[in-house]
Image: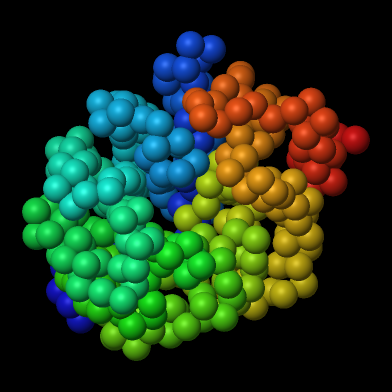
Amino acid sequence: MTTTDAPLKFTGVLAANLLPFTAGLSIDEGAYRAHLRWLVDAPGVTGVVVNGHAAEVASLSREERQRALAIALDEVAGACPVVSGVYADGTQEAVALARDARATGATGILVFPPTLFMWGAHLKPEMALRHFAEIASAVDLPIVIFEYPTASGIGYTPETLARLAEIPTVAAVKDWSNDIVAFEQNLRAVRATGRPVAVLSSFTMSLMASFLLGADGAISGMGSVVADLQAELFAACQKGDLERARVINDRLHPLLRVFYAPPFVDMHNRMKEALVLLGRMPHAHVRPPLTPVTAAERAEIRRALVLSRLLPA
């Protein structure tokens, strides 16, 4: 890949898979394979992201992350790119996880910011630059930068993001700035580098707005439930068909309200419950410290699925 004329590595809707567990909280391989197959068969899906937040990556051991990636590659390799999350608080551990992903056969890696960054790393951009540069020098794989909201303390400024985008193997940014003004600033900063770095929206609560601003696609945990609708929304925005885009956006809205209601930490628990209600996952087990949703909340999820026309009334 050159720094000037390489094509965009990732565009369209990449779905971040949920990870089903058995009652004993081990990976439910059969349910996982069925879930992956639905994702890649959904019209418009261009890739799958494993070992992300949606897969409860913080609760997975290194061996489980390798296994989750290996299963995904065995099930869907060749159908679409498979990107593996690199979730680590230290650069050396991140390099090891990136090497695991490379050895297993991932198409690319999604690099999370270390939580250490929340203690003021935005004032020392050389920390982020060193972290990514060391990963890039150790593993020759396309890198997707995970951009967090500024309020989290671990987001990158547009200036830092632009410097990171100059790293030759950086192929995309997953932008979860969660603020449409910040999203546009980041988009413009990356575009100004002149490098072919895709900007993939993770701003799921305003996906239509970010698509219309010029996002190259999306990476979304909610895609585990509605990747087909997200892909249809992206296509409508690309064509300038605003009437169709608004119709799809209205269908997604009830689910957005219930999935991302406070507490935000339960978003993926709720998505698992939705898949159970849709008959696409056998159970909604989550690993502690996460806790199952209540019966009342499950009823709200069902109502949202009905309003979105994914379940009959």
Q: Is residue 238 left or right of residue 78?
A: right
Q: Nearer the viewer, residue 241 or 135?
A: 135
Q: Residue furthest bottom?
A: 192
**Residue at (73% x, 62% y) in the render:** 249
**Residue at (63% x, 73% y) in the render:** 209
In the rendered image, the vertical position of residue 22 relative to residue 167, given as above or below: above
**Residue at (50% x, 25% y) in the render:** 287
In the rendered image, the vertical position of residue 311 relative to residue 127, given as above or below: above
**What percent of the width, then of the height, locates residue 96?**
15, 42
**What percent of the width, then of the height, locates residue 164?**
26, 73
Q: Quadrant of the N terminus?
A: bottom left
Q: Is residue 123 left or right of residue 298?
A: left
Q: Nearer the viewer, residue 276 or 217?
A: 276
In the rendered image, the vertical position of residue 195 relative to residue 45, given as above or below: below
Q: Is residue 100 left or right of residue 58?
A: left
Q: Is residue 206 left or right of residue 92?
A: right
Q: Nearer the viewer, residue 237 or 184?
A: 184
In the rendered image, the vertical position of residue 276 relative to residue 242, given as above or below: above
Q: Residue furthest top?
A: 24
**What percent of the width, then of the height, locates residue 313?**
90, 35
Q: Quadrant of residue 205?
A: bottom right
Q: Residue furthest left?
A: 138
State how the image is colored. Answer: rainbow
Q: Residue furthest front?
A: 119
Res 99 seen here = yes
**Residue at (40% x, 31% y) in the render:** 59
**What percent of the width, then of the height, locates residue 14?**
46, 52
